Amino acid sequence: MTRDEFDEHVLRIQLDGYTILPGLLTSDECEQARKELNSLSEKNMWLGNLFNKGQIFEIVYQIPSLLEVVRYFLGQDAVLSGAYGSILSSGAGGGGLHSDGSITGPNRLDSLAPADNNLRITSHVLGFNVIFCISDFTKTNGATRVVPGSYKYQALKVPPSPVYGERIVEAERGSALIFNINTWHGASENSTNEARYALFTPWRRQWLRSESELSRIVEPEVLDRAGEDGKRVFGLSALSPYLDLSQWDRENGCPKSEWSHLQRG
Ligand SMILES: O=C(O)CCC(=O)C(=O)O
């Protein structure tokens, strides 16, 4: 990515709340990911924490140009907070829009305090969703739709769809749509006969509660393959201590026997 391209993506995120990074995955990588999603799905496996379920998915947090944009907004210690697959079948999609971060993040209704006056935090980017297009995203196959600029809207409640300005994001296979989690978005209807494939890879500020605690989920060999950067990406570089030092058995690397009930899985 050239400096000018980087600046343009930054501006798009600042103005519209989203941008499209083209050509992050090759056609071969998309094909491998598609096959792997189908195979997991045929085995009835949940399409979450994909980095542990197929080596092809490890690429999603190892693309320098993507990391550069993510870290520009979320800090150098931004953490991956999930990696999900989506197979949107014919006829599925459409319906309402939502913001992300409504379960464990800043858009959680129950976390609004009375003094917030029903206003969410819009001053800073707190998280992104990064959607990898494993299929071409077209006007008719269920591509994500977004409302440009909606990330600045302070009220937490999302108006019913169709919302003024909402648009379907068309993007080539191998691109990634990156958007501020405050952006109102949702899948559009897939009116074609083929499934739409995608990977959803949300990122958060390191100090924000993630969708999943990946530091405790990631397999050791997956972490190994991520190299030094893996510790940041999976949030291991800034873990809060969960035991008092006096409770820790240094020699054996676990809680002392009288505190063994505090052992983390
Ligand atoms: O399927 C899509 O295009 C939208 C995905 C979505 O809404 C989400 O990841 O929060």
Image (spheres, helix red, strand yellow):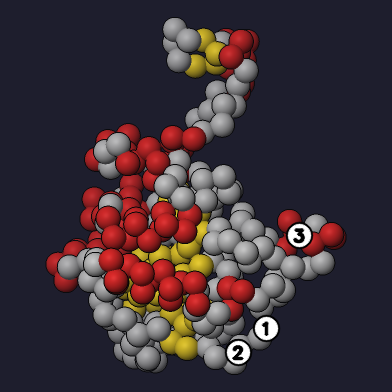
Judge whether residue 90 can be spotted in this image: no
Q: Quadrant of the N terminus?
A: bottom left
Tell me the residue that label 1 is attached to: 159
Q: Position of residue 49 (x, y in %)?
A: 40, 51
Judge whether residue 259 can be spotted in this image: yes
Given contact means CB atoms under 8 Å apart, are the residues at marks 3 and 2 in contact? no
Q: Residues within 10 Å of mark 1 (few under 14, many from 20)?
A: few
Q: Position of residue 32 (x, y in %)?
A: 19, 63
Q: Is residue 110 left or right of residue 96?
A: right
Given contact means CB atoms under 8 Å apart, are the residues at marks 1 and 2 in contact? yes
Q: Residue at 73%, 56% (x, y): give it.
A: 111
Q: Amino acid at mark 1?
A: Pro
At mark 2, the secondary structure is loop
Give the camera-side residue of 240 and 84. Answer: 240
Q: Residue at 46%, 50% (x, y): give it.
A: 75
Q: Position of residue 186 (x, y in %)?
A: 51, 78
Q: Position of residue 169 (x, y in %)?
A: 40, 83
Q: Which residue extends farthest right?
A: 114
Give the camera-side residue of 48 and 98. Answer: 98
Q: Is residue 163 left or right of residue 39?
A: right
Considering only vertical position in the picture, is 97 above or below 215? below
Residue 258 quadrant: top right
At mark 1, the secondary structure is loop
Residue 158 quadrant: bottom right
Considering only vertical position in the picture, is 192 above or below 100? below
* Label annotation for residue 112: 3
- CA–CA distance in space, label 3 to label 2: 24 Å
Q: Is residue 142 left or right of residue 165?
A: left
Tell me the residue that label 2 is attached to: 163
Q: Amino acid at mark 3?
A: Leu
Q: Which residue extends farthest left?
A: 28
Q: Amino acid at mark 2?
A: Val
